[in-house]
């Protein structure tokens, strides 16, 4: 009996499959010119032409940072994926969107509810008009079954499923974009930190040279070969370089703190040794 009703309801669903709420979404047409109205540069035939954008936010880029060949950068990038809170939030939203598809699809099928119950009954031995000193207990088991099915007459359920799938697709693109942005930001901060290390080394060497130059100028002043102005100029040059070295050290600390935040650690919990920049550009960029 129940199987027959399921077949009937299923047949009705197939017959009403063409009835949908509202039209299907279509991308609105946009008038696209063949080229810019401004004249392209001479000798460049491809300049000034329109090109159709092909966004691929959901495509995994892989471990693209390995092209730089820096083991410390590779280790930091791996920590971004495992510890960054923003990336975890984006991943949780993606899983939520995927689960919502199954929730909406469940409305396309019949709902069966079962509420079994079991009880043990025993009559009292002191009932009026009856004398039964040894009543026998009896068992009672109930298995009610409730079957319900709502026909998707106008396609509301199907539209909800399609919307959930589109939401999951958009959330997947958001997750990929968030991951790409965070990994790229860490790579930029790491390169800036190593650049600061190279600048710091150069400025430290310059401070040593200017200190020797100041000492030499003071000795020349004592011997009558230099003036007070020469000593003041040498001292000013040395102090200016020291200030620049301090500024670079502050900037390096800021980049190190940014890296710590990206990998989910407090700034005091990470300390990167000073190594001058030695990253070679990828072969594709040469």
Image (cartoon, grey):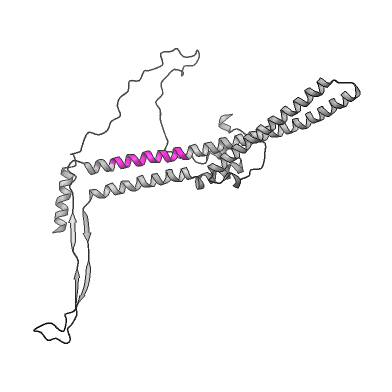
Q: Is residue 203 visible?
A: yes
**Magenta part mainly helix, strand or loop?**
helix
**Which image quadrant for residue 242?**
top right
- x then y, percent, for residue 28: 29, 27
- Furthest-left residue in view? 129
Q: Is residue 284 above or below residue 105?
A: above
Relative placement, left or right, of 41 versus 98 is right
- x then y, percent, for residue 230: 81, 21
- x then y, percent, for residue 189: 57, 36
Relative placement, left or right, of 284 versus 7 is right
Instruction: Locate the N terminus and report the quarter of the image it occupies.
Output: bottom left
Q: Nearer the viewer, residue 79 or 211?
A: 211
Relative placement, left or right, of 175 versus 135 is right
- Furthest-right residue in view? 223
Q: Which span is picked out in magenta?
A: 162-178
Q: Is residue 242 magenta?
A: no
Which residue sits at x=40%, y=38%?
Answer: 173
- x then y, percent, for residue 208: 78, 32
Q: Which of 141 and 42 is in front in this view?
A: 141
Q: Which of 187 and 69 is in front in this view?
A: 187
């Amino acid at each position: 009996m129940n199987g027959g009703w399921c077949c009937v309801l299923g047949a009705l669903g197939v017959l009403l499959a063409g009835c949908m709420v509202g039209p299907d979404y279509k991308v609105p047409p946009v008038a696209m010119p063949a080229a810019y109205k401004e004249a392209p540069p001479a000798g460049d035939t491809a300049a000034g032409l329109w090109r159709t954008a092909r966004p691929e936010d959901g495509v995994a880029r892989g471990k693209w940072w390995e092209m730089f060949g820096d083991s410390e950068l590779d280790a930091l990038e791996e920590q971004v994926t495992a510890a960054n809170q923003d990336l975890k939030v984006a991943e949780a939203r993606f899983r939520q969107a995927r689960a919502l598809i199954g929730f909406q699809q469940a409305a396309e099928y019949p709902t069966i509810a079962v509420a079994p119950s079991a009880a043990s009954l025993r009559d009292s031995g002191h009932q009026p008009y009856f004398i039964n000193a040894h009543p026998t207990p009896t068992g009672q088991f109930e298995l009610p079954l409730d079957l319900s099915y709502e026909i998707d007459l106008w396609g509301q359920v199907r539209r909800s499923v399609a919307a959930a799938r589109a939401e999951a697709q958009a959330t997947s693109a958001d997750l990929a974009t968030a991951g790409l942005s965070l990994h790229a930001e860490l790579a930029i901060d790491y390169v800036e930190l190593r650049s600061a290390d190279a600048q710091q080394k150069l400025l430290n060497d310059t401070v040593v040279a200017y200190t020797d130059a100041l000492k030499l100028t003071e000795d020349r002043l004592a011997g009558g070969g230099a003036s007070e102005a020469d000593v003041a100029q040498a001292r000013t040059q040395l102090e200016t370089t020291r200030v620049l070295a301090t500024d670079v050290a502050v900037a390096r600390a800021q980049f190190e703190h940014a890296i710590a935040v990206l990998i989910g650690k407090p700034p005091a919990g990470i300390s990167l040794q000073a190594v001058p920049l030695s990253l070679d550009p990828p072969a594709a960029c040469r």
